[in-house]
Amino acid sequence: MIRLSVTLGAVVWAAQAGAVTCEKLTHEDKRYTICEVDAASEDLRLFLNDENGDLLGHFSSVNEALAPDGKRLAFAMNAGMYHDDRSPVGHFVEDGEEQMRVIPNAGPGNFGLLPNGVFCIRDGRADVFETLDYIERAPDCRFATQSGPMLVIDGELHPRFLPDSTSLYIRNGVGTNAEGTRAVFAISEDYVTFHEFGRLFRDTLDTPNALFLDGNISRMYDRANNRSDIGFSLGPIVGVVENVPAN
């Protein structure tokens, strides 16, 4: 388990046992829920469709799909933008199979606010890559989802973020450390700007690369704290899978 303790506005991370821990955090007077995953050891996956090709769309549906194998979600979050039919807007890889190619060019909306990025899950690590860097490196991702914009790029905020922006939404995203061992997920409990959200990942969560996953529709599942946000069907979902305890 990773437990957050706040001292004089800073966050101190202390490692303990456990798959994933979600904690409340206030940063610059805005409230967030932060979930840290040990990407080197935990079963972190992306979900979109079930074995029949039908959309999962809900945390409960993912749990139903995992149940026959004695598995369940410990944590989950929506994991990228999608079209009306819930297909991914950008690159998407599920269990080693590419379902959508990488989109390298600019486009409308937040996704096209370049630079955007890709969240890549490999054996023993997880990384956020800027999209062009991802194309150049061509990592062998078991799971990958493309979204945008990048929040933090090599320790710097996205160059187009404005400190005085008035665009306020509930937002969620993910950041990773340089070693790929820490994947830190955040969802705002208050309306925040991109600049505020990026500063959270850069200054407090200590992730040199971080990616915006979505806004407004942002939802989270946290089994340990009995949280399961509900709403209309989602597209890609990211989650930590654990074994169902024996009776």
Image (cartoon, rainbow, N blue to C red):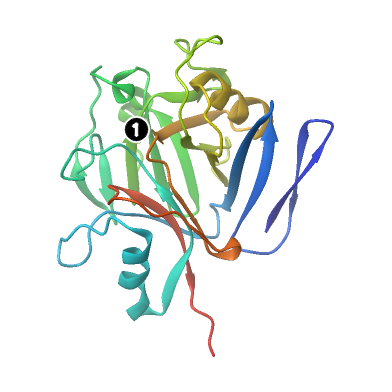
- Residue placed at 39% from the left, 42% from the top? 120
Q: Secondary structure at mark 1?
A: strand
Q: Which residue is mark 1?
A: 147
Residue pushed farthest right?
8
Residue pushed farthest bottom?
247
Closest to the observer: 43 or 66? 66
Q: Is residue 138 visible?
A: no
Q: What kind of residue is marked 1?
A: Ser
**In the image, is residue 71 above or below residue 231?**
below
Where in the figure is residue 114, as x and y percent of width and height?
35, 17
Q: Is residue 9 visible?
A: yes
Q: Quadrant of residue 54?
A: bottom left
Where in the figure is residue 132, as x and y percent of width and height?
33, 23
- Residue placed at 33% from the left, 26% from the top? 136
- Residue placed at 25% from the left, 39% from the top? 82
Left or right: residue 131 versus residue 202 is left
- Residue placed at 52% from the left, 60% from the top? 42
Left or right: residue 79 versus residue 18 is left
Q: Quadrant of residue 156?
A: top right
Q: Quadrant of the N terminus?
A: bottom right
Crowd band around label 1 with a 10 angstrom C-alpha radius: few (<14), some (14–19), many (20+): many
Q: Quadrant of the C terminus?
A: bottom right
Closest to the observer: 239 or 137? 239
Where in the figure is residue 53, as x and y percent of width and height?
15, 61
**In the image, is residue 53 above or below residue 64?**
above
Q: How many marks?
A: 1
Left or right: residue 46 versus residue 154 is left
**In the image, is residue 213 above or below residue 163?**
below
Q: Quadrant of residue 26?
A: top right
Where in the figure is residue 52, as x and y percent of width and height?
15, 67
